[in-house]
Amino acid sequence: MKKTSTKFFKKPRLTEHHRRYRVHGGTNDKFNISMVYGYKHEAWHFIFHHYKINVICALLNEYLLDNYTVEVLCLQENVPIEENINIDGFLSKRDSKRQKRMLSIEKNWKILFNKKKESEIIKEINDIWIDPACYLKIIKKK
């Protein structure tokens, strides 16, 4: 008798995402936690690591959005921001590594947002991923 495969697929696990990262003073309070699938959580941190909100905004504008730009609006004064933004190192200077990194970013972007419209992506980023004391304001490119 032929043995049947016992391979099965586990249901994706939910993980806690700290909207204000703990390294930036984020807490375990309910308002600062989003429950997200682990594979999406990994994709988010592959692209955005533990960058501060204004760096995330700069990366979105420079590399990831085609039809919109975004600007950060903060609802509190104590939001951690990067004083001197330098996103030059986001992609490697060497063409071969740069191309490979961009392909990996695109792959993870698809894992996160699949075929969503840019306006839907920004709404999801605001609702789930970034510091709850901030939001990204959408500006249509001319």
Image (spheres, rainbow, N blue to C red):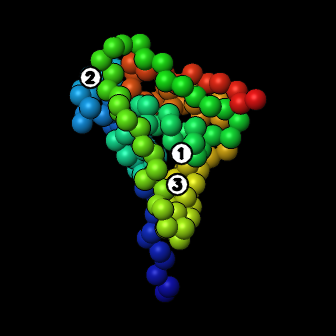
Residue 71 lies in quadrant: top right
* Residue at which label 2 appears: 29
Residue flagged by tag 1: what amino acid is it?
Leu
Residue closer to the observer: 109 or 4: 109
Distance from label 2 to label 1 (Cα)? 24 Å
Instruction: State the residue lying farthest toward the bottom.
Output: 1
Residue displayed at 47% across by 74% down = 5
* Residue at which label 1 appears: 112
Can you tell which mark lies on residue 76? none
* Residue at which label 3 appears: 105
Given contact means CB atoms under 8 Å apart, are the residues at marks 2 and 1 in contact? Answer: no
Say few, some or many: other residues with alpha carbon within 10 Å of mark 3 (under 14 / 14 to 19 / 20 or more): many
Distance from label 1 to label 3 (Cα)? 10 Å
Q: Where the C terminus falls, by quadrant?
A: top right
Q: Measuring from the top left, give residue 30's x and y in whole percent.
A: 31, 22
Residue displayed at 40% across by 21% down = 132
- Element at badge 1? helix
**Sequence-wise first label, 3 or 2:** 2
Residue displayed at 48% across by 18% down = 73
